[in-house]
Amino acid sequence: MTPKLPMPSMVRFINLVLETAYKTLQDSEKKKFFQRVIREARERLQVETNKENKLRAKKGLPPISNESFEADLKITTKKIIDELEERKTHSEKMDNAHRKLEREEEDFRKMKEEIEKNTTKEWESYRDKRVKNWSKFQSKILNGKRRGKYETRPPKYKMEERGENDKVDVFRPNTII
């Protein structure tokens, strides 16, 4: 049986991945970032291992071996990177939502100002007509020409009726003793 050779497309893909990883690590900022992530993962893993070993010691079991430490370190590192990416995307979503809300509020404010400006302009343009109509209406009332069902009239007076025995309190004239 002949050994299987990798496909050329597979080799190109692996080379591309290695090349991008190498370029990423050449950037000093990204290198520092990944070093901090690996340090954090190592610290977390050591804390978890110490806790687990203490629990195992109480139960009388042997401590966890360091053979799986590298594999666990890779998994923990991946989890931390995923957490950071999730925080970053959440932060970006919140920023976008905040910017959208500000933009909508600004648009609403501009629209409101425009409506107020148009209303004021319209109000001023019809001012002369309103003044003319009001003065015409007032002149009809003052000259006595206006007679109709909408005319305002003074109230009719009704005389107060009291009996002969009703006495009025001098200090409080509206009360009867």
Image: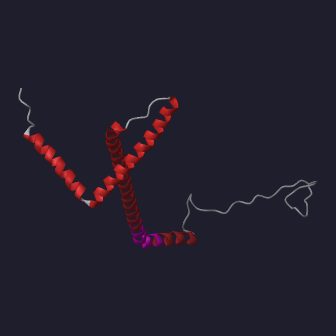
Residue 80's place in the image compared with 31, above or below, is: above
- Quarter assignment of residue 129: bottom left
Residue numbers of the magenta segment: 118-131
Q: In front: 80, or 151? A: 80
Q: Position of residue 10 (x, y in %)?
A: 12, 40
Q: Position of residue 175 (x, y in %)?
A: 87, 57
Q: In front: 169, or 112? A: 112
Q: Position of residue 83 (x, y in %)?
A: 37, 46
Q: Is residue 78 magenta?
A: no
Q: In front: 101, or 159? A: 101
- Quarter assignment of residue 173: bottom right
Q: How is the image coloured?
A: secondary structure
Residue 150's place in the image compared with 131, above or below, is: above
Residue extending farthest left:
2
* Residue 154 horizontal side relative to residue 165, left or right: left
The quadrant in which the N terminus is found is top left
- The residue at 55%/60% (across/down) is 148
The quadrant in which the C terminus is found is bottom right
* Residue 110 horizontal side relative to residue 1, left or right: right
- Magenta stretch, main secondary structure, is helix
Q: Position of residue 96 (x, y in %)?
A: 35, 55
Residue extending farthest top:
1
